[in-house]
Amino acid sequence: MAQQDTVLEMKGIVKKFPGVIALKNVTFSAVKAEVHALVGENGAGKSTLMKVLSGVHPYPSYDGELIIKGELRRFSGTREAEKAGVSIIHQELNLIPELTVAENIFLGREPVKPPLSFIDRKKMNEEAAGLISSFNIDISTSALIKDLSVGRQQMVEIAKALSVSSDILVLDEPTSALTEMEIKTLFEIIRDLKKRGVTMIYISHKLDEIFEICDSATVLRDGETVATLPVSELDNDRLVSLMVGRELTQLYPDRNAEIGEEAVRVENMYVANPFLPGEKIVENVSFTAHKGEILGMAGLMGSGRSEIVTAMFGAFPANTAGKLFIEGKQVDIKNPQHAIRSGIGLVTEDRKRFGLVLIMSVKENTSLAALDKVSASQIIKPGEEKKLVDKYIHELNIKTSGQNVIVNTLSGGNQQKVVISKWLANKPKILILDEPTRGVDVGARFEIYQIMNKLVEQGVCIIMISSDLPEVLGMSDRILVMHEGTITGEFSREDATQEKIMSCATGRRQADRAS
């Protein structure tokens, strides 16, 4: 495109945090009506750069120039950025759980009734309903955010951003919690916005999305600009090499684990909806998993995958029925503390809400589930705690300037590694991983896969829930498929295909489920 079409220029951007230089002289630009990918590993600086653009990091907390439509801009906050035509959909949801869908979408911009300026709730709900309906999903505008799944909260976040007329729209991992149908709808919206002249900056670790929806790509590595190229000049291998600075010869590491005796057995489990009395989320589900095995669980959003493992962890004792056996002995788990003592660890789907204490440090989060291992007479032994945490910072390659760094300041992928380290520190017999690589770059994914393989080689049983079918196929020894609260298929690693899994995930039952 011609130079006059340039909408955004960021020149020589430098951003520092205590002990860390997050951005080092970054240069980035985008032209009108393009979808420009911003890619790189976790911690490369993508989200930080976009927070500079959107006023989350106001001037003069950074050095460099921000130029929008030829005008030098220095935002003091997000409101100024919005007025200048910049909107952002953050990777980590930025919604208020206690407010409704409509209230979140129009927060700070509520329509009012003259002359007393009362909020016009009817108009607000009607406008919110119009935005939500464009996604072809059924969400009540009066529903509280806290009662929605992560995927539906993500759709509300997208609707909120689109409710503001913007020239520049930043989408930071927008599909991380969406179903395939919702992703398809989002891409249709992106193409429509492009026709209207909107410039979009698209951040995603899903490289297939980059090639499907983006026109050009800028690669960041270690806080620096590596390259900007048309997507048509890239392929998957070259893009990965630019991101990680090395060739990745395989996506999934080789497996050497031997599957052993039964580690966990679920018999006739029911899980009732804790919010809607009388509605069952999981109905009459039975399965086993073994030591040294990775048992994959696939299914569409709402199939009951997350609910059954959360129930196993003791989160819904009043809403759960059935039997649970660990190493052949029946256990009656009434709460998560009991589950932890029984040898179960759970890496939750929503790390910020359930996996981390965001105001606490890397050290405090890592040792949280294993305090008995670093204390005596209920007094923490600082030397033992430091030794434990250092071990997992090293083994999981967590990018942090120190143990005392507040975990909320880390990138999403490094936050995920801290969650995993918390459970590894507790030496679980059964480790449940719910979407373990969501929002994690290709290099860090491989590291997580290596950790999983190392654990099963040590005899740990892993139950992995994933919406990424190649991941399920690449990492699982055996795969269960769920649909509407029941198991509709079970496949060995050798027999499983994406087609078979999707068939069962959409309701068709496997003819002969393996025993």
Image (spheres, rainbow, N blue to C red):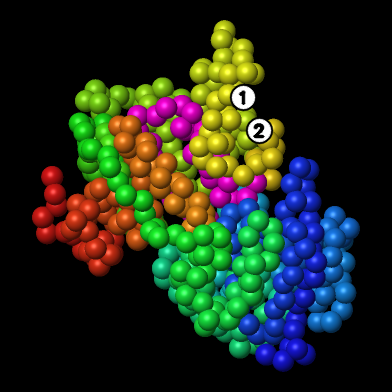
Crowding at label 2, few (<14), some or many (≥20) Cα neighbours within 10 Å? some
Left or right of 360 in this view: 445? left
Mark number displayed over residue 269:
none
Q: Please identify the quarter of the rendering in which residue 290 is found.
A: top left
- Dot 1: what SS? helix
Q: Residue at x 60, y 74 (%)?
A: 217
Q: Is residue 429 magenta?
A: yes
Q: Measured along the vertical axis of the image, is residue 427 above or below residue 457? A: above
Q: Residue at x 57, y 57 (%)?
A: 41
Do we see residue 280 in this rendering?
no
Do we see residue 26 in this rendering?
yes
Q: Which residues are magenta?
A: 410-439
Mark number displayed over residue 403:
2
Left or right of 180 in this view: 58? right
Instruction: Check whether the beta carbons of the residues at disc 1 and disc 2 lie within 8 A of each other.
Output: yes
x then y, percent, for residue 318: 39, 32
